[in-house]
Amino acid sequence: MSHSLFTLNNPAGLYDPAPNGYSHVASVAPGARLVFVAGQGGEDEQGRLSADFATQVRQALGNLRIALESAGASTRDVVKLTVLIVDHSEERLHIFGAELQAAFGAGAKPTCTLIPVPRLALDGMLFEIEAVAVLTGG
């Protein structure tokens, strides 16, 4: 996928990660402005966490969207995601993949590193996602 400020690709010699919802490489154009979004969990506006993993993922992706929009960015501008999942499993991977598809839509997905962890910052927190986005310099 080519964006005016970055290119996502999956080079020959590496497996196709598209079914897993990410790309292998992101290249950023010179002069672009980077936006870094801190880890977003599944807390609602009042700081409440659902006990349900899918609900936390959906809320965290919504929180990510709000954070990106505050900087003038959208999911289309994201080049890198880092995902932390408590008690990671194939089932949780599929839930995350479906929610990511719903949040990011069709097309190439940003590069992504998923890190299984035993615990996150808050009791009951099961999911966290941070992002790097690219915007026009200035």
Image (cartoon, rainbow, N blue to C red):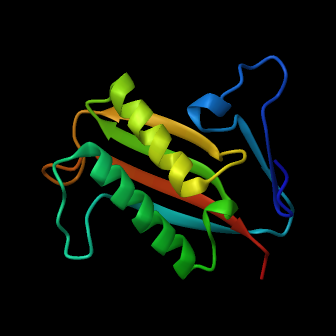
Where does residue 85 sit, x and y in percent of width and height? Answer: 34, 38
Q: In the drawing, does residue 75 fall left or right of residue 54?
A: right
Q: In this view, does 116 lie to the left or right of 124?
A: right
x%, y% of residue 89? Answer: 33, 25
Locate residue 72 relative to residue 92 in the image: left or right: right
Report how many numbered discs are placed on residues in the image.
0
Q: Which residue is drawn at 61% across and 62% down?
A: 75
Residue at position x 26%, y 64% from top? 43
Closer to the camera, 61 or 119?
Answer: 61
Residue 78 position within the rendered picture, expressed as x and y whole percent measured from the top left = 64, 58
Residue 3: quadrant of the picture: bottom right
Task: Classify residue 115 by image quadrant.
Answer: top left
The C terminus lies in which quarter of the figure?
A: bottom right
Residue drawn at x 47%, y 36% is 114
Q: From the viewer's perspective, tell me whether residue 5 is left or right of residue 74.
A: right
In the displayed structure, 86 sits above or below 120; it is above
Whether residue 40 can be seen here: no
Residue 126: where, in percent of width, then height?
25, 44
Q: Which of 21 and 80 lies nearest the eye of the viewer?
A: 21
Which is nearer the eye, 67 or 55? 55
Looking at the image, which is closer to me, 18 or 115? 18
**Vertical order, 21 against 30 (above or below):** above
Quarter of the view holding residue 5: bottom right
The residue depicted at 49 percent of the width and 39 percent of the height is 97
